[in-house]
């Protein structure tokens, strides 16, 4: 294999024309590529503060084997790669003078690319402390019994409440983002639909969001319950409702990410019927 097997483009429509069928063949595993390609297609890379977007397609004998996407200067995010494919990609990007701050992918792919990038450039990779697990829904099993209350979908008139919940979630997970009316449209939170769980008196106690249906999959993202209200079944109830809505919307795969270091959330998702699909890691390059 040579580095010339990788086709690079800044045209998202060109990328999807070449790789769309491949990405849709395993929509759950390819959630990041599908989601970000659609965001760039509909809003442009500049909506996310990116200098530009770069996409890559690995083709061999007329067949797509892998892809990557990157919103410069953010992380490189490839689909699953063999060590040989990762080395070919590292060689191509290094030859073109790319400077990468990080790579984010399934653990084996991220590790293979980090090692290849170090060989090609001398950059020292550092594995991030936060590691994620990607889950795919099998058979949805809602909590029984459900906590008292009901689910309510937030609409256009609830933007202040949506921004409040997203700000709470971002602060809880350490995501550095400004969320206000002026910046809202440029955040990754703006294209989601949100549902809150309310107690019988109408008090919202937990939130879950879901991305649009893209390429046959829907990602459940975000899920958050304030610390003082945890352990009462609210997160399970609202996640079940959003998962049900995703299935009703026609999703072939319903997926979500969970912090592998959080046994409570991992156990919750598995009780609801989610099954591990891949472990996800990131490496930063010194």
Image (cartoon, rainbow, N blue to C red):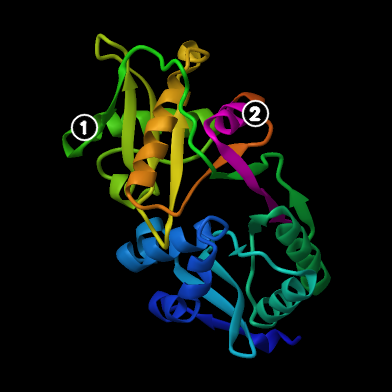
Q: Is residue 279 magenta?
A: yes
Label 1 neighbour load within 10 Å: few <14, some 14-19, many 20+:
few
Is the N terminus in the top left, top right, bottom left or bottom right quadrant? bottom right
Residue picked out by circle 1 = 158
Residue 243, given in percent of the width and then of the height, sits at: 42, 38
Task: Find residue 252 and report its image quarter.
Answer: bottom left
Q: Which residues are magenta?
A: 265-286
Is 63 a magenta residue? Answer: no
Mark 1–mark 2 distance (CA, rounded to whole Å):
30 Å
- On screen, residue 45 versus residue 1, left or right, reads left
Q: Residue at x 61, y 65 (%)?
A: 78
First along the sequence among labels 1 and 2:
1
Q: Is residue 238 above or below residue 194?
A: above
* Rendering quarter of residue 240: top left
- The image shows residue 119 at horizontal and vertical percentages of 83, 70
Residue 60, position as x, y percentages in the image: 65, 86
Q: Is residue 183 visible?
A: no
The answer to whether any part of residue 80 appears in the image is yes
Q: Is residue 178 placed above or below 122 in the rendered structure? A: above
* Residue at mark 2: 262
């Amino acid at each position: 294999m040579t580095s010339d097997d990788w086709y690079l483009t800044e045209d998202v429509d060109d990328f999807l024309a070449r790789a769309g069928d491949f990405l849709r063949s395993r929509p759950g595993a390819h959630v990041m590529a599908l989601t970000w390609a659609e965001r760039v297609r509909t809003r442009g890379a500049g909506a996310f503060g990116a200098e530009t977007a770069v996409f890559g397609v690995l083709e061999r004998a007329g067949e797509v084997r892998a892809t990557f996407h990157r919103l410069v200067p953010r992380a490189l995010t490839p689909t699953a790669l063999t060590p040989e494919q990762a080395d070919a990609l590292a060689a191509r990007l290094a030859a073109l003078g790319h400077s990468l701050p990080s790579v984010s992918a399934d653990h084996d792919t991220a590790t293979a690319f980090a090692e290849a990038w170090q060989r090609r450039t001398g950059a020292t990779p550092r594995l991030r402390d936060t590691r994620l697990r990607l889950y795919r829904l099998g058979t949805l099993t809602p909590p029984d019994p459900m906590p008292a209350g009901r689910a309510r979908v937030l609409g256009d008139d609830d933007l202040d409440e949506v921004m409040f919940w997203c700000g709470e979630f971002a602060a809880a997970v350490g995501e550095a983002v400004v969320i206000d009316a002026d910046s809202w449209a440029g955040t990754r939170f703006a294209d989601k639909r949100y549902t809150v769980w309310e107690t019988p008196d109408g008090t919202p106690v937990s939130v879950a969001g879901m991305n649009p249906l893209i390429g046959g999959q829907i990602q459940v993202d975000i899920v958050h319950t304030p610390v003082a209200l945890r352990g009462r079944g609210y997160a399970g109830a609202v996640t079940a409702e959003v998962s049900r809505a995703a299935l009703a919307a026609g999703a072939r795969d319903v997926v979500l990410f969970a912090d592998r270091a959080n046994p409570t959330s991992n156990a919750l998702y598995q009780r609801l019927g989610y099954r591990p699909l891949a472990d996800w890691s990131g490496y930063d390059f010194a």
